Amino acid sequence: MKADHRATLTRRQIYSPGLFSVTFYSPDLASQVAPGQFAMIDVPGRARPYLRRAYSVADADPEEGSVEFLVKTIGPGTAALEEMPEESTVRLLGPLGNAFRIDGVAAPERVAIVAGGIGAAPFPALLRAMSRAAVSGDLYLGGRSSAELAIRERFEGIVPGETVLATDDGSLGEKGFVTEVLARRLAGGAKYARLYACGPMPMFAALAKVAGAAALPAEFSTEAEMGCGFGACLGCVIPGTEKPFIVSCSEGPILSPEKVRW
Amino acid sequence: MTLSVTLGPLTLKNPITTASGTFGYGLEFTDFVDLSVIGGLCTKGLSLKPHAGNAPPRICETPAGMLNAIGLQNVGVEAFLSEKLPKLRALGATVIANVWGDLEEDYVTVVRALEGAEGIAAVELNISCPNVRQGGMLFGNSPPLTRSLVAKVRAATQRPLIVKLSPNAPDLVESARAAREAGADVLSLVNTFVGMAIDPETARPRISFGTGGLSGPAIRPLAVRMVYQVAKALPDVPLMGIGGIAELSDVLEFLAAGATAVQVGTANFKDPGVSGRLVRELEDHCKTRGVAIKDLIRRAHRTGGRVGGEAGAEG
């Protein structure tokens, strides 16, 4: 059940300036949240931002009662999370949205995970679920430059397969868009049963074509500016193919790419 | 202690209601609010046919508030009656059906469709939405059009009729008078203010519609002034105050300005349990202070102070 959870900051890890994770003690949320779901975070006592912001849950540990978010600093809300002292309290509205599905994938089938920049945020939880289900796969991590890929540290030791890095400027891993790298691998004979992706809209548009051409079933964790996070404001719609608009927060955020008008 | 308030023919169990467009169909909030506890909920604006709304981006945050141009996306009156209303009835909600249309006939047809349904306490006419190209605010910004529309709807319903006023109208008191004289039982004010935000990088409006309706605490002083003004000019008309209400002190402020009830809006997005909390806090306030609700209403009109612009005000 959705609820507004009071949560205490227990841990912060900085991967590079402006790229970090925050972990909160929030046992009720930790026990309920599924991979791909999100929470609306309210940092109390601040005039800006006024509305909450949506953050994918990066990982949750029900035994520890912890919920982790991977964050990139882009404005006052994310800066508040970066600067917040330990033991500070926030409010986490969640769990919200739908979740990645890993049922229907069974070894020796493998999956591909594609992340653009901070789009890596929801995948530690998915990798944890894959590990429980003994599903293996490769992580494709793309960014503008090596600095943006500092987030790879969070994935060390938890990817049941290869971690493929790509940067626009070639400063780390393969040069080019991560979508092109995946397309090359697929053309070279790589076989996946499912594709999971999260990143900016242009990445999704390119990836939808790659997945379509390879007839690869896909689940995209979409992003739209949200007012409420639970389907009330209808602010976060995405143009759809089967109907004019999909409400990203309540019908998503995980959507099949053929349902979206890219 | 009763928190019950009477607005003409409409009696609410308490003065805390939720504003149209900020509370979905109520059902989105059942994890956070017991719908039977709040004074009432105004539904998403209902139209004759399902309406898809505007292209994204539809919202953007602004200082202490937000701009929106959702464009009145809704399931249409038929789906509301068959899918939403039975659930709301089962939950014991006091439902205020908000209605909009492109043309006068559309409003009348929707109101007629609602007329036979069980479990609707009142109808609220949206003549003040700034985010559609036809209808909406066009009716609210012209007293003759307001008068004509409200009279036609009045003839089509036995239910308490609320008319939601536009703060963008050239003369709000004139609009209020027109709506009242044409048969409105209650006036709710204010809807959103037309605003705009431009991305300084691209120089494009942040909302695809171009302009949007400004809401949230940013507009509260403007809304309080407008409620005060209409309450002063039309002291016999029951008012519902709307505009950036998020705390008990905001509720008390609107009641003092002359509202008999309030509608909580944008705060529902940030804090979905806010409406239920405000009912509890208002009850506690009345108990600990030993005051009745009626003593809280129009207090600012009784304190004797003069307000700028009123006859005799100085400076």
Image (cartoon, rainbow, N blue to C red):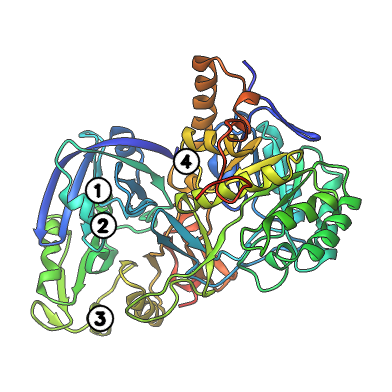
Q: Please, which chain is the residue tagged with disc 2 on?
A: A
Q: Is mark 2 on a helix, strand or loop?
A: helix
In the depicted view, which residue is nearer to us: A185 or A42? Answer: A42
Per the image, the residue denoted by label 3 is A189
Name the kind of residue labelled 1 in the image.
Answer: Asp
Residue B181 pos. (x, y %)? 84, 51
Tell which tag, 4 or 3, sits nearer the viewer.
4
Nearer-N-terminus badge (3/2) = 2
**Residues at circles 3 and 2 in contact by the CB criterion of under 8 Å:** no
Name the kind of residue labelled 2 in the image.
Answer: Pro
Q: Please, which chain is the residue tagged with disc 4 on?
A: B
Nearer-N-terminus badge (2/1) = 1
In the depicted view, which residue is nearer to us: B301 or A38? Answer: B301
* Left or right relative to A245: residue B162: right
Query: Does any portion of residue B31 appear in the rendered image?
Result: no
Q: Is mark 4 on a helix, strand or loop?
A: loop
Give the quadrant of residue B186. top right
Rate crowding at label 2 as few (under 14), some (14 to 19) or many (20 or more) other CA atoms within 10 Å.
few
Vertical side of B110 occupied by B33: above or below: above
- Identified at 68% across, 42% down, the residue is B231
Per the image, the residue denoted by label 4 is B246
Both labels 1 and 3 in a single chain: yes
Quarter the N terminus of chain A occupies: top left
Q: Distance between the residues labelled 2 and 1?
A: 23 Å
Residue B109 pos. (x, y %)? 85, 59
Residue A59 numbered tag: 1
Name the kind of residue labelled 4 in the image.
Answer: Ala
Both labels 4 and 3 in a single chain: no
Q: How far apart are marks 1 and 3 (CA)?
A: 32 Å
- Identified at 10% across, 59% down, the residue is A15
Q: How far apart are marks 4 and 3 (CA)?
A: 57 Å
Query: Does any portion of residue A27 appear in the rendered image?
Result: yes
